Image: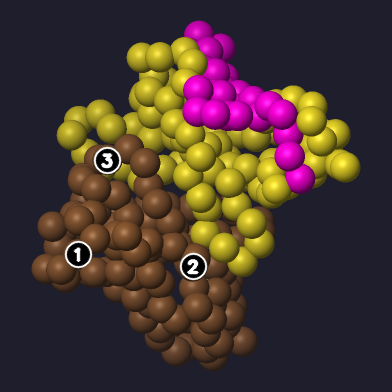
Amino acid sequence: DQQVKQNSPSLSVQEGRISILNCDYTNSMFDYFLWYKKYPAEGPTFLISISSIKDKNEDGRFTVFLNKSAKHLSLHIVPSQPGDSAVYFCAARWGGGGGADGLTFGKGTHLIIQP
Amino acid sequence: KAGVTQTPRYLIKTRGQQVTLSCSPISGHRSVSWYQQTPGQGLQFLFEYFSETQRNKGNFPGRFSGRQFSNSRSEMNVSTLELGDSALYLCASQRAEGGTEAFFGQGTRLTVV
């Protein structure tokens, strides 16, 4: 049972346009969400995160939106650049009960930026 | 500030053998988590250590184990290797237990033949 889903395995966007990557989750106990970027043969690189008490967080070209009622979050990259081509993972964690739970990852979306 | 360091980067082992992977977290970070990445299952949580204690464990068999030392460095061990254990093993470092952002190392690519 996949608790974090990224339904688009790949996405192609023209350079300079907006890239929108989507993520859905099923566990309402998740209270923190993160986006990671991954190049082949490297570990994931942290991009941006959002707490469940917020609905938007912005960092430069990256903005994450959270819709708790729909259990949906999205990552917007604008403008898209060739170096943004990578696999993007959505991740969620539940910090409840004082425990240190691991991150639950989606399967990733391969973003391809076309020149 | 040095990032998360994992050694070795690549490893080839034979079925039935055991393997130990090492992870040094970012200086000052006390929490270390381990993840397995495979093409079919994606990134899956193995376990998390804080203050030399395992705090949480994912859904993996007992052949997968780990430990953390007083300097926060961590090792994970896989015994009686199976072909399906071939994967990229990633270590993540966090400042504190239950911390938010996790910073990953480059991983150890394990191939079981």
Q: Could you tell me the amino acid type at mark 2?
A: Gly
**Disc 2 to disc 3: CB gap under 8 Å:** no
User: Label 2 to label 3, Cα distance in Å?
Assistant: 21 Å
Q: Nearer the viewer, residue A28 or B4?
A: B4
Q: Is residue A23 left or right of residue A83?
A: left
CB under 8 Å between discs 2 and 1: no
Chain corresponding to yellow in the figure:
A
Write the residue at 14% across / 62% down: B52
Label 2, on which residue? B107
Q: CA distance from mark 1 to mark 3?
A: 15 Å
In terms of depth relative to the viewer, which is nearer, A10 or B64?
A10
Q: Which residue is mark 1?
A: B72
Q: Amino acid at mark 1?
A: Ser
Identify which residue, A64 or A101, lies in the foreground.
A64
- Helix, strand or loop under label 3: loop
Q: Looking at the image, tell me whether mark 1 or mark 3 is earlier in sequence order.
A: 1
- For disc 3, the marked residue is B99
Give the extent of the magenta segment: A58-82
Left or right of A84? Residue A96 is left
Residue type at mark 3? Gly
Kindly state the secondary structure of the residue where label 1 is placed.
Answer: loop
Viewer can see residue B76: no
Crowding at dot 1, Cα within 10 Å, few <14 / some 14-19 / many 20+, comes out as many
- On the same chain, marks 2 and 1? The answer is yes
Up-down relation of residue B110 to residue A17 (above or below): below
Where's the C terminus of chain B, which quadrant? bottom right
Is A60 one of the magenta-colored residues? yes
Residue B63 in percent (x, y) is at 37, 72
Task: Please give the chain letter of the residue carrying mark 2.
Answer: B
- Which tint was used for chain B? brown
Residue B17 figure quarter: bottom left
- On screen, B30 above or below B87? above
